[in-house]
Image: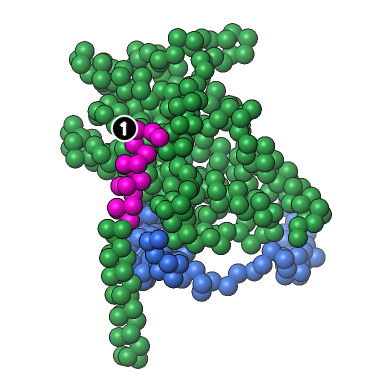
Chain colours: A green, B blue
Amino acid sequence: METQQQLDDFQARIDAGEKIEPKDWMPERYREQIIRMGSQHAHSEIVGMLPEGNWISRAPSLKRKLVLLAKVQDEAGHGLYLYSAIETLGVRRSELIDQYLYGNAKYSSIFNYPTLSYADVCVIGWLVDGAAIVNQTKLAHSSYGPYARANLRICKEESFHKKQGYEMVAKLAEGTPAQRKMVQSAVDRFWWPTLMMFGPNDSNSPNSAELLKWQVKLNTNDELRQHFVDRVVMEAEAVGLTLPDPDLKFNDETGHWEFGEIPWDEFWDVVKGNGVMNRERMKSRRKAHEDGAWVREAAQAYARKKNLSREKAS
Amino acid sequence: MSENNEKDWPLWEVFYQPKNGKPYEHAGSLHASDAENALQNARDVYARRNEGIGIWVVPSDQITASTPEDMGSFFDPASDKPYRHPQFYSVPRAVKKRS
């Protein structure tokens, strides 16, 4: 049983800015929250390979194909950093994967939207990775040491993801009328789903208070969303693209850009599994996992055989 | 269910040497079927941008670590020995100025 003294001591460590390491005492609820949030984050990185992976074979040039391959490979790496950070809490990788593929673990809804053109790949780099950077830069200061370190490593790589996306967006925006139309259409479709990536409004976010108290996360969903909007408005203006929100306007007093109501019905619908690509994404992930089973088994059989022959020789 | 828990590949801790002459540091961990596979995975997961010029992989269950519970008593032999630090000693003013 957790005593009040233990909980108070733990909170004092958090308030003093100390990092919590795997073997340290922690409330069971803290452990559960890190596992829940961290594994959702990991699953998102893994499923996030699909929308862009869809376009690797159709990249417009060899250079863009190399860039996209490197980016998608990074996403796999990010998933692996996060899984291993979460495993320090004593949960097994196979459990996490099972919850994800066959249970009810969640991942970011943004990956349940289809990528209809190469401009979508460009806009994902700019907006989706841009939003992810805002989140992860803060999570790099999270109170759980291994999770913070995984996020720090991710941030170092993520800025290339965003920059390559924005570069392509800028190129398309100054291209032919058809290219301009294509990139504007991608922005129109990805704008609101990107704002949803920060999660529900603070007034409607059941986990937030606890996560903030324990400094698992350091800012509220709405704070991070505002930070993102303020930056992206300038970036859109710089390349002459329009963000699809008639209510977007600068507030002189607050110094922030105000934006319209996010279509939350759509958000909850996609979270519940009814997005355009939910079923397709899960089907692809399960298939990849199951088709890879023989590789995992073969590698293990090979390791066993090598061990045996080494033992015999000695 | 796809596979049971025993089918997880063993866990390895990864250390890399960032530059010639620098000490190895912990990067993170990964699953791999054997040592050779662990080295290759470590390169792909933790050194895609020349983060290291050398990699060590160690089976995680082979690491013996101190525990937070005895952190105090385990390390306290060092805490009452200020004379192990140069600040403990005073030197003549003239010498101090020159250094």
Q: The disc numbered 1 marks a residue on which chain? A: A
Q: Is residue B69 above or below residue A311?
A: above
Point out residue B11 in the picture as x, y percentages from the top left corner: 45, 66
Q: Is residue A151 magenta?
A: no
Point out residue A60 in the picture as x, y percentages from the top left corner: 18, 31
Q: How many residues crowd mark 1 within 10 Å: few (<14), some (14–19), many (20+)?
A: many
Q: Is residue A104 above or below residue B39?
A: above
* Residue sitting at x 56%, y 37%: A138
* Residue sitting at x 64%, y 27%: A203
Amino acid tagged 1:
Pro
Image quadrant holding the N terminus of chain B, namely: bottom left
Marker count (numbered): 1
Front residue of this view, candidates A152 and A259:
A259
Magenta portion: prevailing SS class: helix
Q: Is residue A5 left or right of residue A46?
A: right
Q: Secondary structure at mark 1?
A: loop
Q: Place residue B83 in its image quadrant.
A: bottom right
**Does residue A140 appear in the picture of this structure?**
yes
* Residue sitting at x 53%, y 10%: A250
* Residue sitting at x 62%, y 13%: A254
Point out residue A45 in the picture as x, y percentages from the top left corner: 41, 44
Q: Is residue A101 above or below residue A238?
A: below
Q: Place residue A154 in its image quadrant.
A: top left
Q: Is residue A293 above or below residue A275?
A: below
User: Residue beneath label 1, please?
Assistant: A114
Point out residue A239 in the picture as x, y percentages from the top left corner: 34, 16
Q: Which residues are magenta?
A: A274-289
Q: Is residue A285 magenta?
A: yes
